[in-house]
Amino acid sequence: MRLNNQVSYFRIILTLILAMCLRVVPLSEEMALLNPDWVLLVLVYWALNTPERVGIFHAWIFGLLTDVLTGRLLGQYALAYSLIIYVCLKFHNRLRQFPFFQQGLFIFFCLLLSQLLLFFIKNLQHPAQLHASFWLPVFTGMICWPLVYGLMRFVSVFRFIK
Amino acid sequence: MAVIASTILLVTEYRSSQISGVRSTLSVVVDPLKYLVDFPTALIEHAAHSVSSYRALKLENERLREEQIIHQSRLLKFEALEKENIRLRALLENSFKLGEQVLVAELLSVNMAPYEHIVVVNKGTRFGVHPQQPVLDANGVVGQVFRALPFTSEIMLITDPNHAIPVQVNRNGLLTIAMGSGQLNRLVLPFLPSNADIHPGDLLITSGLGGTFPQGYPVAVVDEFTTEPNKAFATITATPKALLDRNRELMIVWSKSVPVPLITKSIINKEDPSDEVK
């Protein structure tokens, strides 16, 4: 517990910035369809592990920044992220006890909810056709969750030698 | 509260797009990330340039010089033709817009969102870029500025599914609209009847209607024309002239807003403020 309390804002913000970079990294067309929502994954990790540091407000701010970064209508990622982080904060005590597999399932539903919200907003702007590959990032996100979890665990434990 | 705030943001921007100030302020925070992501690509390119051999450079230099001579001689002719065109237009009592200013912008290799053909370049409102400016490359029309931020701007390519560009067939002046298809090497022309006079190989140029794109730039070459008896419109596809997936340098164009004065009615024309191109 002591360890979690000492995770500085510097690390949290640094990882979120890295996640935002990954979000817009240039990939081939097929790979771009698979690129998961890294910012959300990282946000969820911090919300589950340091709920006293990362709140809905942070999620909202980073959602807004993601909106600007990816050129969406302002506020749609902000809305999706703050809702999901709210759910995470609500259940973080229970979720931390869950086995890894169940956590993965939870992440899957988080990503699905976010994608649904984005699709809903897109559809309000102009009726869009639903492409099957629209849901691919949800699956790749779930597959990437153990990777994110391991890396982030490393980041939060890692200490510079004094 | 966050939900309410984001909903308000969404609605206001959807309704009026009046909060571009918020966006450009936030983009100052976010734009360095775009440059950061672009950095490795730029570095590799730079390295490749600096280690290319003396021989290769010399060859390229020779080739460029030859090209330049050819283009120069063409330009000589072009100037004479331009003058002649103005004179002829004057005979028809028709004003003629001519001359554009360009700014070379470099592409940032950043992937905005799948399904949309939007690219980011490294010039923004600091350089006077504004939305709806046409963007070209050496071969043809690339797209238009979709959103101008202080340090970068987003450009919608002509192949984006939401983009349409007014074109005309160079051979006979047939007017139509070319829409993006979502594939980088294809445009579709959905509004031509089955008996339209258009063949594979026809060059499509901008018609200048709508006021966004200046007239006369090459857009695409028609590559397929199929008619189906049970449909009212023909299925026509075209390949863009611009190298949309290979170019790193793009040109953002300012059309000169003052038309070239008529020779016969130059005084009247000067007082006439009618001008649809901003």
Image: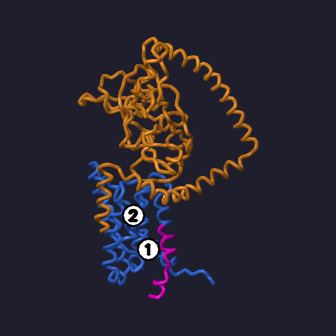
Chain colours: A blue, B orange
Q: State the residue lying farthest toward the left.
A: B230
| Residue B146 falls within the magenta-colored stretch | no
> Compared with residue A155, is residue B69 higher up or lower down, i.e. above or below?
above
Locate the N terminus of chain B by quadrant: bottom left
Mark 2 or mark 1: whose residue is earlier in sequence = 2
Query: Quick one: SS at disc 1?
Result: helix
Tag 2, which secondary structure?
helix
Q: Chain of mark 2?
A: A
Q: Amino acid at mark 2?
A: Gly
The percent coordinates of residue B192 (x first, y second) are 31, 28
Q: Mark 2, mark 1: which one is toward the viewer? A: 2
Q: Residue at (58%, 20%) from the top-left corner?
A: B79
| Residue occupying the point 48% across, 35% down | B141
* Residue A128 in view, yes or no: no
Q: Which residue is mark 2?
A: A63
Residue B57 quadrant:
top right
Could you tell me what secondary structure mostly forms the magenta stretch? Answer: helix
Q: Position of residue A131 (x, y in %)?
A: 32, 52
Q: Which residues are magenta?
A: A1-16
Residue visible at 47% across and 57% down in the picture: A24
Distance in Å between CA atoms under marks 2 and 1: 23 Å
Viewer-proximal residue among A33 and A157: A157
